């Protein structure tokens, strides 16, 4: 009977320690996600201002339509180059199904 009591106490202590570790890791995860969201918003705002600045820059020589088209093409090129770089960094390992090698 004493063995079962010790086993029960040991299990409860283990669950308590794991619960504290889970809480600590969840707090870290929430903090990292919050920082990531703020950085994403700031990055998108910065890219928006950069694109608007390019639009104004090209507006000196071209009309509004041509300026918008040039900025759109440049933004598209940046996205394509970024995707190619990410694919190169990951080594083509972008696969949603890990079982399907």
Image: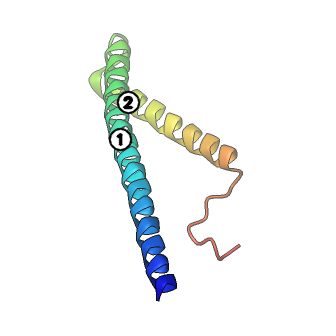
Q: Is residue 25 left or right of residue 86?
A: left
Quadrant in the picture for residue 15: bottom left
Q: Is residue 18 left or right of residue 65?
A: right
**Mark 1 vs mark 2: which is more N-terminal?**
1
For the residues labelled 1 and 2, the Cα–Cα distance comes to: 18 Å
| Image location (x, y in percent) of residue 16 | 39, 63
Q: Nearer the viewer, residue 44 or 77?
A: 44
Q: Nearer the viewer, residue 75 or 67?
A: 75
Q: Nearer the viewer, residue 56 or 29?
A: 29
The quarter of the image holding the C terminus is bottom right
What residue is drawn where x is 36% and y is 36%? 35
4 above or below 64?
below
Q: Nearer the viewer, residue 88 or 30?
A: 30
58 above or below 24?
above
Mark 2, other Cα within 10 Å: few <14 / some 14–19 / many ≥20: few
19 above or below 66?
below
| Image location (x, y in percent) of residue 36 | 38, 39
| Image location (x, y in percent) of residue 97 | 58, 72
Q: Secondary structure at mark 2?
A: helix
Q: Which numbered mark, 1 or 2, is in the foreground of this view?
A: 1
Quadrant in the picture for residue 93: bottom right
What residue is drawn where x is 56% and y is 45%? 83
Q: Which residue is mark 2?
A: 43
Q: How is the image coloured?
A: rainbow
Quadrant in the picture for residue 60: top left
Q: Residue furthest left?
A: 64
- Find out whether the residues at labels 1 and 2 contact each other: C-beta distance under 8 Å: no
Q: Which residue is mark 1?
A: 31
| Image location (x, y in percent) of residue 9 | 43, 73
Mark 1, other Cα within 10 Å: few <14 / some 14–19 / many ≥20: few
């Amino acid at each position: 009977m004493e063995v079962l009591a010790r086993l029960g106490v040991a299990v409860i202590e283990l669950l308590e320690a794991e619960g504290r570790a889970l809480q600590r890791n969840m707090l870290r995860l929430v903090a990292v996600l919050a920082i990531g969201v703020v950085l994403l918003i700031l990055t998108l705002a910065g890219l928006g201002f950069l694109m608007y600045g390019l639009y104004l820059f090209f507006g000196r020589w071209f009309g509004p339509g041509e300026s918008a088209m040039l900025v759109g093409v440049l933004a598209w090129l940046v996205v394509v180059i970024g995707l190619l770089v990410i694919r190169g960094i990951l080594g083509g390992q972008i696969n949603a199904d890990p079982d399907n090698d």
